[in-house]
Amino acid sequence: QVQLVESGGGSVQAGGSLRLSCARLGHSYSRYCLAWFRQVPGKQREGVAFATTGGVTTYYVDSVKDRFTISQDNAKNTLYLEMNSLKPEDTAMYYCAAGRSFGPLCLSPSEYDYWGQGTQVAVSS
């Protein structure tokens, strides 16, 4: 069983930065798909950054490309999301997610078995 524990959300002004952390406790798979999703009330959960454990491949949706960076500390089993040049439209609840990796990146929410509790990010103009 795996538990994901998030931290690092908060309120910032537009143009500011935040770093989200997601500690992965427990162990289920030899290789994981990892991702950060976000959701605002009334809208579907949106994946914004994707990676795999031990891999160098990452993927970002266009709206966050060149502003957000997904990274991981394998020794600490911790996933990060560095968010720079934040915009009001980045305001959302952010969730980290983990699932079993069979090779390629996992881009669909249905491919993820474990989810963090969510951390709120609020960006004011």
Image: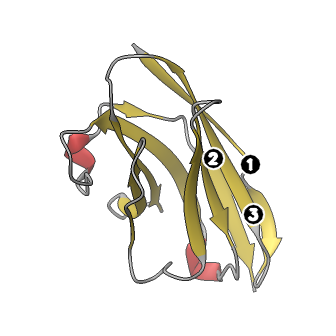
Question: Regarding mark 1 in the picture, which secondary structure is present there?
Answer: loop
For image coordinates 21% across by 53% down, the residue present is: 104
Question: Regarding mark 3 in the picture, which secondary structure is present there?
Answer: strand
Dot label at residue 8: 1
Q: Position of residue 55 (x, y in %)?
A: 39, 50
| First of labels 1, 2 by sequence position | 1
Is the C-beta separation of discs 3 and 1 under 8 Å? yes
Residue for badge 3: 18
> Dot 3, how many residues are within 10 Å of its Cα: few (below 14), some (14-19), or many (20+)?
some
Q: Quadrant of the N terminus?
A: top left
Q: Relative to 47, does residue 8 appear above or below in the rendering?
A: above
Q: Nearer the viewer, residue 118 or 102?
A: 102
Question: Regarding mark 2 in the picture, which secondary structure is present there?
Answer: strand
Amino acid under label 1? Gly
Q: Relative to 4, does residue 69 appear above or below in the rendering?
A: below
For image coordinates 72% across by 57% down, the residue present is: 19
Q: Between label 1 and label 2, give the one nearer the viewer.
A: 1
Amino acid under label 3? Leu
Q: How is the image coloured?
A: secondary structure
Q: Relative to 122, does residue 37 appear above or below in the rendering?
A: above
Residue for badge 2: 119
For image coordinates 66% across by 63% down, the residue present is: 82
Amino acid under label 2? Thr
For image coordinates 42% across by 57% down, the residue present is: 56
Is the C-beta separation of discs 1 and 2 under 8 Å? yes
Label 1 vs label 2: CA separation? 7 Å
